[in-house]
Amino acid sequence: MQALSCSFPLTIPVMTGYVFLGVTYGLLMQSAGFPSWLPTLTAAVIYTGSMEFLMVEILASSFDPVSAMATAFMVGARHLFYGLAMLPKYGNTGWKKFYLIYTTSDETFAVNYGADIPEGIEKSWFYFWVSFLDQLYWVGGATLGAFFGRFLTFDTEGLDFVMTAMFIVILLAQWEKDGTRLKGCIRDHIPELIGLGASFMCLLLFGPDRFMIPSMVLILAALLAVRKPLERKKEEEQA
């Protein structure tokens, strides 16, 4: 219980975002004509907010499993790096490791990776409760949205813009963080600029309906290409 009481305050910001986004997801699924139990099931099983919002369109469109699989892989590819970063922390967590891997969302990774766990608190249980609470917020929000969506009659057109707004906020937060942590020059914002440039270029080349997968591939390739030069430059500056 000490681990729970220690982890809960750190998840409050995640709760405010996850509940709102979860409710929005549940409303979108309900407005798209899906049964009220499906948002809860997909929220618990898929548990990756960005992909679940995309699933609304995927499930409502013609059956294309290859495209759906490729989209899911590219959207979730960033979790490969999350897993590598969390190896030292999740390495000795016993049976909890599988659940921790499954529930490593963006926000859960941020909390668990940067948490300063007090002495006397079992780290594996701290990580577990952060992961469990974050998932509970998301699934609970989706369930609420699906439930109340049956009684709402207002037009939900444009509600899916919340996903675009969330990504814009994440981009701005990352831009501000890098500008504060580093020197604030353009070179310090190379990852963000790569994302913007690659997405815009693929949008022009492939159009709004097909640009996402090529842009994700291009972003991943570009980030891997510039990683070592940036690391060498950083080591030279610190020397």
Image (tube, grey):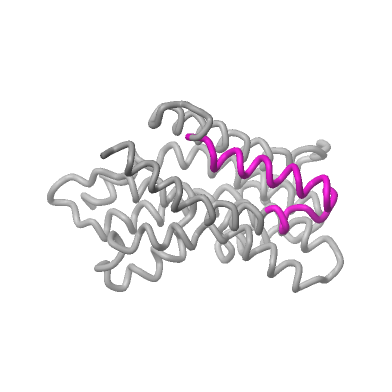
Q: Does the magenta stretch include residue 78?
A: no
Q: Does the magenta stretch include residue 189?
A: yes
- In the image, taking residue 185 as reference, residue 211 lies left or right, namely right
Residue drawn at point x = 60 percent, y = 58 percent: 221
Question: Percent x, y for residue 8?
Answer: 34, 44
Q: Which of 110 and 80 is in front in this view?
A: 80
The picture quadrant where one finds residue 83 is bottom left
Question: Percent x, y for residue 5?
Answer: 27, 45
Number of numbered callouts drawn:
0
Q: Which of 86 and 94 is in front in this view?
A: 86
Residue drawn at point x = 57 percent, y = 57 percent: 48
Question: Percent x, y for residue 216?
Answer: 66, 55
Q: Which of the image's four quarters has the C terminus?
A: top left
**Dominant secondary structure (helix, strand or loop) of the stretch shown in magenta:** helix
- In the image, taking residue 186 as reference, residue 69 lies left or right, namely right
Residue drawn at point x = 46 percent, y = 65 percent: 102
Q: Nearer the viewer, residue 224 or 211?
A: 224
Residue drawn at point x = 82 percent, y = 60 percent: 60
Q: What stretch is highlighted in magenta?
A: 188-215
